Amino acid sequence: MKKSQRKEIKEKTFEELQADGRNLRQELLHLRLQQASAQLEKSARLNTLRRDIARIETRLSQIRISKAAAPAQTAG
């Protein structure tokens, strides 16, 4: 993933990231089905997708943690 793509992930909203994650998971499923039927041409795409999904999930976790920490800071 290029730096510009990583920057895009940081700038996206929570809902956009969830949608992207869902789409990438669906694509990963289709590629796994192709691999199982020996029709997959670019097997490296599987690893790339897994890493992209991990990046999105990491960013989603960061957003969740910051949202959870924000009310705790204002309550103190």
Image (cartoon, rainbow, N blue to C red):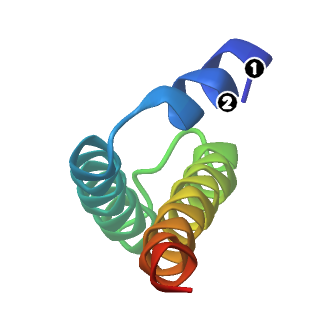
Q: Relative to 66, is 8 above or below?
A: above
Instruction: Name the residue beneath numbered marker 2.
Output: 6
Is 23 on the left-hand or right-hand side of 6? left
Identify the mark at residue 46; answer none if there is no mark: none
Depth check, front residue: 65 or 59: 65
Q: Which residue lies furthest to the right in this view?
A: 3
Discs 1/2, front = 2
Give the position of the N terminus as an image quadrant: top right
Q: Where is residue 34 in the image (x, y as percent from the top left)?
A: 35, 59
Q: Relative to 7, is 47 above or below?
A: below
Q: Relative to 11, is 16 above or below?
A: below
Q: Are marks 1 and 2 in contact (CB under 8 Å)?
A: yes
Q: Which residue lies furthest to the front in this view?
A: 76
Depth check, front residue: 64 or 17: 64
Q: Position of residue 49 (x, y in %)?
A: 55, 51
Instruction: Name the residue beneath numbered marker 1.
Output: 2
Type of residue at label 2? Arg
Is 5 on the left-hand or right-hand side of 2? left
Q: Relative to 3, is 66 above or below?
A: below
Residue beneath the point at 78% across and 19% down: 3
Type of residue at label 1? Lys
Say which quarter of the image contains residue 67: bottom left
